[in-house]
Image (cartoon, rainbow, N blue to C red):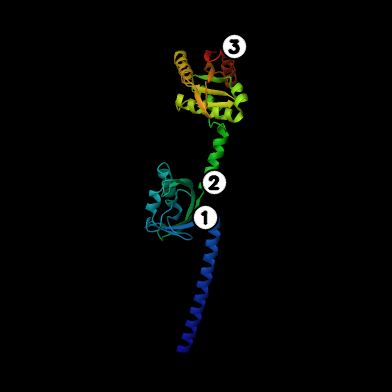
Amino acid sequence: MIVKLMQENARLEKEGSLLREKNRILEQKLNAALDGTGLCLWEQYIPTGELTMYNMEWGSLLGYTIDELAAHIDSWKANLHPEDRDWVIANFEDHINGRTDSYDVTHRMVHKDGSISWVSDRGRVIEFSENGEPLRIMGTHVDITKEKRYEIELAKLAHRDPLTDLLNRKALLEAFEVLRQSALGGALMFIDLDDFKANNDRYGHKFGDSLLLKIAEMLRLEFNESNAIARLGGDEFVVLFDTSDRAQLAGIANSVLSSFSEPVTVESREITVGMSIGISCFTEQSFTAVYEQADSAMYDVKRQGKNSYVFA
């Protein structure tokens, strides 16, 4: 009897050892697969808030060691981006409380060095108590910072002039429509550089690009952040205003001309930049109509001697 028990015990120990080895190999394969995708597998024991990470150390995604950041739900909440914290926690608790089928959000977290990480979080409650209370939730956490930055850059390129980083025509049209639909009216200021082609031909296209960058920088300093400033190609710049007060707009135009009255230094050369400015006030007119009026007014300035402004 004792011999049989010993044999059975030895058999069970052998089977247990084989199962542990199989489990170890499976864990290695799982970790290798997860590491290859950048996906982190996590589990939370809901009653205590304790977190377990299966294929990496807790906190490592944010640059912390396990000693610096406790593996707990409170640590996760503390490192959520301030602007995302409330709605992310609300989404998490909605699932825990049975109001949603799963937890699935994309949000920002604050890295140890102060930088921002974008993550995609998903989870689902996998165990309940006899009373129906949630006990464990398991999910995945993926760092998508690179993808998000690429997405932001693409969105930026779709709305920005590639040389000056001012708004492009598409973004200007959107800003114009917002202003037009506000029923307050506004004004479009068309700015064309005087003798830009002559400088471009004399000093080369690289100099011309540097000059445009300088002009864009000075225009940003001249106008408020609320003003939409765009480059529509070549040496043509457009600025939108949420006022149609001619006295105020005339003051702004004079200020711009005054700012550019002194020579500017571009690539170690000092040149004087003149500007011909056409201004068109609008209420319900289309962008095309307003733009053409301002463009026509700008050419009136060219014909009258340049470096001034005219209202359409």
Label 3 SS: helix
| Rendered location of residue 215, percent (x, y) | 52, 26
Answer with left or right where residue 93 lies relative to residue 39.
left
| Rendered location of residue 311, percent (x, y) | 53, 13
Report the amino acid beneath label 3: Arg
Tag 3–tag 2 contact (CB < 8 Å)? no
Q: Toward the viewer: 273 or 267?
A: 267
The residue sitting at the right extreme is: 201
Q: Toward the viewer: 285 or 248?
A: 248
Identify the residue shown where x is 59% and y is 23%.
Answer: 199
Mark 3 and mark 1: span between their CA atoms? 65 Å
Report the amino acid beneath label 2: Glu
Residue 17 position (above or below residue 153) = below
Identify the disc placed on residue 39.
1
Residue 186 position (above or below residue 267) = above
Report the amino acid beneath label 1: Leu
Mark 1 and mark 2: span between their CA atoms? 14 Å
Q: Which residue is mark 3?
A: 303
Label 2 SS: helix
